[in-house]
Amino acid sequence: MDFVLIDDEPITLFLYKKLFQLEGLSDKVIAFDDPEEALEFLQQQISSGQVPQVIFLDLNMPRISGWDLLGTLEPYKEQLQAKCLIYLLTSSLAPSDIARAKEHPLVTELIQKPLERHIIHKVQKNMRGSR
């Protein structure tokens, strides 16, 4: 598992999965439309030493926001910082979110939706550079 997608909009996940399929990466993606399920999955994976290389995390979700999910992952900070790039996805680039993302130790970058091919290529380049 290289990529974990977390977004509460099923249509968005469908489109992102198609995008990864076009890039030949569909077998490396696990997607969640329920942030609670995603959090449980991530906690289990990290606890067993299987950290995803990249997490794409929607910032604005109704039950658990991307910020809340990041807060819950704080106990795994060392494991995540060593192996995982976390990209926040948002449809609105509020200055407060931009500033908070830059200061957050787990966040690699804040990306404005939609996720596009050139962004995936940039992320893949970052993946190679972080190893």
Image (cartoon, helix red, strand yellow):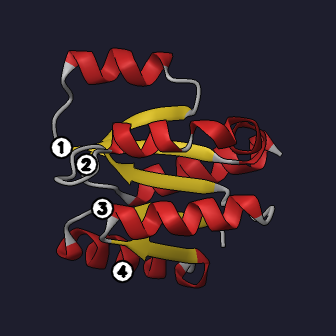
Q: Which residue is mark 4?
A: 18
- Tell me the distance, in whole angstroms, between the alpha carbons under discs 1 and 4: 19 Å
* Element type at mark 1: loop
Q: Which of the labelled discs sits on residue 7, or is there none?
A: 3
Check disc 4 and report its element: helix, strand or loop.
Answer: helix
Q: Residue at x 50, y 23 (%)?
A: 104
Residue named by callout 2: 113
Question: Could you tell me which quadrant the N terminus lies in?
Answer: bottom right
Q: Splitting the image into 4 quarters, where does residue 77 fall?
A: top right
In the rendered structure, which amino acid carries the disc numbered 3? Answer: Asp
Residue depth check, mark 1 versus mark 4: number of the one nearer the observer: 1
For label 4, the crowd category at 10 Å Cα-Cα, with few meaning under 14, some 14 to 19 and many 20 or more, is some
Structural distance between the alpha carbons of marks 1 and 2: 5 Å
As measured in the structure, the alpha-carbon distance from the residue carrying label 2 to the one carrying label 3 is 11 Å
Q: Earlier in the sequence, mark 3 or mark 1?
A: 3
Q: Earlier in the sequence, mark 4 or mark 2?
A: 4
Dot 1 or dot 4: first in sequence order is 4
Q: Is residue 51 visible?
A: no
- Residue 126 visible to an observer of this rendering: yes
**Mark 1 or mark 2, earlier in chain:** 1
Q: Residue at x 16, y 53 (%)?
A: 62
Tag 2: amino acid: Lys
Asked which secondary structure carries label 2, the reply is loop
Q: Nearer the viewer, mark 4 or mark 3?
A: 3
User: Residue 46 appears at what percent x and percent y?
Assistant: 70, 58
Relative height, residue 70 to residue 31 (above, below): above
Q: Which residue carries the number 1 mark?
A: 91
Mark 4 and mark 2: span between their CA atoms? 15 Å
Q: Residue at x 45, y 66 (%)?
A: 38
